[in-house]
């Protein structure tokens, strides 16, 4: 009987140590679980539509409405990557041409189709839609992992935040993160081969002349 009591007392410190160790590990935020080098922190592209209803007629937009639209473009800081479209119930080519001319001053072309927006366009008006995309990496920076243990040999929760965050901030057109820009298919062969042709016809000197100047 005395030996049994001594055995129970000996087990008590071991149980206390195990419980305290479990609580300490549980408060460390856990260990990383992503065993690949593929970052789970990826850029996300969000689109926002801004609209302006302008008064129109079959002959297009009056000068006053064109000035108002131009001022709106300037206030919205129209830039590369923005997309302009026209929702016109009359489908007037004159209205589209007027909007295209104003957008062209900012180096932009108008889209062939306008996205769906809330509300409806009243008769005698056309809706100019500015679609702007932004890119960001949600959840970055991520310092949730506060444990030094990494039995899974996994990457940290914030892995990829730096490069993907910079990539999302620096890309000129966030839509290119979803689908790359398409080329025009045109090649300027003449400009690319001009140097080769010059070398073949004029030799290594390229037809340059040497001017000799007298010395003292």
Image (cartoon, grey):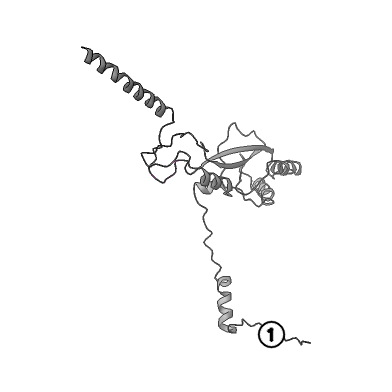
**Image location of residue 44, percent across then percent down:** 51, 41
Q: Circle 1 is placed at which residue position?
A: 210
**Which quadrant of the view contains residue 132?**
top right
**Image location of residue 12, percent across then percent down:** 31, 18
Q: Residue at x 39, y 40 (%)?
A: 34
Image position of 181 (left or right of 17): right
Whether residue 87 is visible, yes or no, is no
**Which quadrant of the view contains residue 207?**
bottom right
Q: Residue at x 57, y 35 (%)?
A: 117
Up-down relation of residue 194 to residue 101 (above or below): below
**Which quadrant of the view contains residue 58?**
top right
| Mark 1 burial class by Cα count in 10 Å: few <14, some 14-19, many 20+ | few
Quarter of the figure with the C terminus:
bottom right
Q: Secondary structure at mark 1?
A: loop
Q: Residue at x 55, y 46 (%)?
A: 166
Q: Nearer the viewer, residue 80 or 123?
A: 80
The overriding secondary structure of the stretch rendered in magenta is: loop
Quarter of the figure with the N terminus:
top left
Q: Nearer the viewer, residue 87 or 151?
A: 151
**Image location of residue 198, percent across then percent down:** 59, 79
What is the residue that sits farthest to the front in this orientation? Answer: 2
What is the residue that sits farthest to the top in this orientation? Answer: 1
Is-magenta flag for residue 38? Answer: yes
Image position of 68 (left or right of 206): right
Start-end of magenta stretch: 36-40
**Image location of residue 75, percent across then percent down:** 71, 41
């Amino acid at each position: 009987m005395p030996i049994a009591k001594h055995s129970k007392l000996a087990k008590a410190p071991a149980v206390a140590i195990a419980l305290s160790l479990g609580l300490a590990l549980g408060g460390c935020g856990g260990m990383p679980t992503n065993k690949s080098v593929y970052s789970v922190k990826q850029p996300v592209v969000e689109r926002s539509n801004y609209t302006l209803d302008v008064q129109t007629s079959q002959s297009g937009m009056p000068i006053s409405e064109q000035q108002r639209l131009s001022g709106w473009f300037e206030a919205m800081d129209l830039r590369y990557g923005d997309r302009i479209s026209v929702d016109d119930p009359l489908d007037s080519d004159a209205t589209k041409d007027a909007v295209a001319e104003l957008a062209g001053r900012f180096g932009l072309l108008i889209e062939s189709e306008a996205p769906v927006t809330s509300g409806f366009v009243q008769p005698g008006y056309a809706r100019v839609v500015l679609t702007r995309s932004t890119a960001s990496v949600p959840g970055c920076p991520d310092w949730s992992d506060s444990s030094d243990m990494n039995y899974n040999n996994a990457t940290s929760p914030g892995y990829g935040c730096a490069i993907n965050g910079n990539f999302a901030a620096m890309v000129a057109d966030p839509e290119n993160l979803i689908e790359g820009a398409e080329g025009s298919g045109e090649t300027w062969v003449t400009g690319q081969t001009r140097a080769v042709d010059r070398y073949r016809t004029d030799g290594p000197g390229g037809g340059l002349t040497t001017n000799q100047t007298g010395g003292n």
